[in-house]
Image: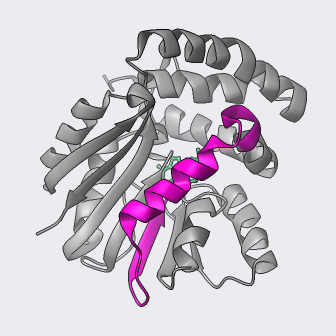
Amino acid sequence: MVEKVNFGDELVAPQEKTRRVGEVFSSVARRYDVMNDLMSGGMHRLWKDRFVNRVKPRAGEDILDMAGGTGDVAFRMATRGARVTVADINADMLEVGKERARARALDLVWKVENAEALTFEDAAFDAYTIVFGIRNVTDIPAALREAHRVLKRGGRFYCMEFSSSDWPGFATLYNAWSEKVIPRLGKAFADDEASYRYLVESIRRFPRPNAFRNMIAEAGFIRASAEPMLGGLVSIHSGWKV
Ligand code: SAM
């Protein structure tokens, strides 16, 4: 029997999860950027700036921004001179990203790819980034192994992801915000309560920073580390391929 996986709080077959995650992001694509601002009070912009400061993209580097969606992180890296490939399983998210890139006159490569089984050659990239994407992937260890495969020796892996916070007061406040307010914002501004409920549930279910750091090490990266912010609600993870 195929082992079931979580789609938010529901247990479903692995292919069903991938299909439903696809539906969520097709449904939110057009409102994704404005909803990010509403849900995080604009904080996602600061987190992404901090993330890119950690990655330190350099002119002439090839960087794969996996689960890159509408391009927020990719644009920040491209303006620093890196050659950025934005890959995502969802063509609707990439379509919005391409329109935004045209408006900014930024030249990037856009590709539909499943993080679990990439079509890129071995050792193709200097850095691999994945922001708020990996918790949506059905087989996370497979995606980490693929990240390791497509990086050059000396290549950097960087991931930013949500989890639950261990700051007691803040965690209570955040849980109330995420369980009560975010799905309502989804209903009011995007007419889509279910998708936003999934996003909240998937955050709560993602491993704590130290557990995810161990998964990065198991995929073959050395110096795997986690930099938790807001008590682990958001963390920047990194690893190095030798
Ligand atoms: N990185 C962007 C950002 O921070 O704004 C987008 C993040 S969005 C929350 C998550 C993205 O992960 C979606 O665009 C979704 O299509 C993508 N995704 C989910 N599963 C994926 C998979 N297996 N392979 C590649 N992308 C995936």
Left or right of 65 on screen, residue 110: right
Residue 47 part of the magenta-drawn span: yes
Position in image of residue 7 (x %, y %) = 51, 25
Q: Is residue 41 visible?
A: yes
Left or right of 235 on screen, residue 197: right
Position in image of residue 136 (x %, y %) = 49, 39
Query: Looking at the image, what colour scheme do you see?
Result: one colour
User: Nearest the camera: 234 or 141?
Assistant: 234
Left or right of 2 on screen, residue 73: right
User: Nearest the camera: 128 or 90?
Assistant: 128
Residue found 23% across the figure and 31% down from its top: 211
Q: In the figure, 22 relative to 162: above or below?
A: below
Residue found 27% across the figure and 36% down from its top: 212
Position in image of residue 218 (x %, y %) = 14, 45
User: Nearest the camera: 48 or 17?
Assistant: 48
- On the image, which quarter does residue 105 sit in? bottom right
Q: Which residues are magenta?
A: 37-66
Residue found 36% across the figure and 59% down from its top: 117
Q: Is residue 67 visible?
A: no
Left or right of 120 on screen, residue 225: left
Residue 220 part of the magenta-drawn span: no
Residue found 66% across the figure and 17% down from its top: 177
Q: What quarter of the picture does the C terminus occupy?
A: bottom left
Position in image of residue 238 (x %, y %) = 28, 54
